[in-house]
Amino acid sequence: MKKILFILLAVSLILSSCFDNTADESTNAETKADEVIDSSCFHADDDDNGKCDKCTGSVLATLDFYAINDLHGKFVDTSANEGVDELTTYLKNCTSADDHSVILSSGDMWQGTSESNLTKGKLITDWMNEIDVVSMTLGNHEFDWGCEFIKENKEIAEFPFLAINVYDRTTKQRADFCTPSVLVQRGNVTIGIIGAIGDCYSSISPDKVEDVFFKTGDELTNLVKTESTKLRADGADIIVYSLHDGYGRTKGGVSSVFGNEIASYYDISLSRDGYVDLVFEGHTHRSYVLKDPYGVYHLQDGGDNQGISHVEVEVNFANSNVKTGTAEFISIDKYDSLKDDPIVSELLEKYKDDIAQGGLSIGNNKYKRSGDEMRRLVAETYYKKGVEKWGSRYDIVLGGGFVSIRSPGYLAKGEVTYAMVQTLFPFDNPLVLCSIKGSDLLNKFINTNNSNYFVYCKEDLGQIDKNGTYYVVVDTYTSQYAPNNLKEIEMYSESIFARDLVADYIAAGGLS
């Protein structure tokens, strides 16, 4: 009998517990239901109090935007810069903890390091897939290998390439490898992102953009206004402008900026008339947070993997009012101690055959060489290679021209790998023999005030005849820059560039 009573008591307790749990779950369900807005309601918030005038639910949502610009292929750790392994961890933590986060890029992501250059940007595109980038605006350096490689990267990208103002020269239609904008959904909020490249022709070798042209100035403004209107009609609650162009007068800090101060690259009417709510910028390699006269924030992260831009906004998806909370530059110092994300090593393994050349040791450097010393070396190798190839037919008097060097801007002491040289001189601009009038030789090269022009002259150059014709060896970036008044005669090789000549020089013991 005691056993029967004990069993009945146990059953009673179990049933009581079940009923109690059911009651708790019902209460929780009702609580959650109160928090979830009525999806069938056509929301309105005329008094802008954050509550729907009809269903009384909250119509406010918080979004976090994280933007990257001018990464320039800085994928792995080197003595000069950090790789993206900790950045990957940081961004994944942000997106996993908050489904209202958005990651986007404002261009110049590929060109710059051996790992990215040897894969023609595919390594970086794959990485952007892994961190769930929603869009990438094309920058000027995306064109450094020509449109063919933009198209190849588009095939593997899981996000659109944005460039509202890049047009095909033949068809006069927008280039088929880019789109003007993208709509992104985060909860109840619809985000419209418009991408554009600035007037960056002077930063691209002309032969790389023979098939396309950029609409700039008023034409670009009209394109953005039309697209913004279309996106609003399609339900966008906030319009983000991702522009590969930017402010060039500040390195950091939060400050207001006058409309005329940004007029060289941004039409203030886009802010004044409500076409744009937030602007992420690039190209000038500055880190800043600026607020224009109409309250629209403009941010750029400085480039070269030194940090990222972050903005937190509150969006009222019933009336599309946008309020900016946090707007900041997040320095790499804030996340470089995080655990490395394994995707970096996984992608290096995936592309190991493509990037193997970068790891090759080519020689030894006895002293740390400054950027200017390395650029003078490029000018010297241009001259000597030119004399070697064409000296029997032409009296070559000068080598060099506009010689650009990238981060870190110097060659470290010790063992030198091909990757180190390629990082300094990543550009695929072949050498070319040119003729030039004596007066232009003096004005553009020998007596120039341009700090980026480096030349190596023939020892017995003598007095220059201003009306005479002279022969020089430069690369195609210099030869195709119209104001130099150079006439191309013959190319050295389509596959030999500054980095190759410097690598050969080092391999021969030139810096040891």
Image (cartoon, rainbow, N blue to C red):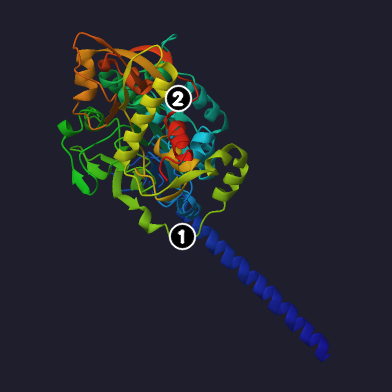
- Which label was assigned to residue 39? none
Determine contact: label 2, label 1, CB under 8 Å: no
Report x, y in % for residue 411.
Answer: 38, 45
Secondary structure, mark 2, is loop
Callout 1 crowding tier (Cα within 10 Å): few <14, some 14–19, many ≥20: few
Residue type pointed to by label 1? Leu
Measuring from the top left, give residue 112's x and y in whole percent. Answer: 43, 37
Query: Closer to the camera, 224 or 424?
Result: 424
Q: Is residue 145 above or below residue 113?
A: above
Query: Which of disc 1 and disc 2 is earlier in sequence?
Result: 2
Report which residue position mark 2 lands on.
Answer: 179
Where residue 480 appears, x then y in whole percent? 34, 17
Number of marks in the image?
Answer: 2
**Which x, y percent locates residue 393?**
40, 11
* CA distance separating discs 2 and 1: 35 Å
Choose between 354 and 319: the one closer to the eye: 354
Q: 7 or 198, which lies in front?
A: 198
Res. 465 visible in picture: yes
Indicate whether 146 appears above or below 359: above
**Which mark, by number, is residue 338?**
1
In the displayed structure image, the side of residue 444 where residue 478 appears, left or right: right
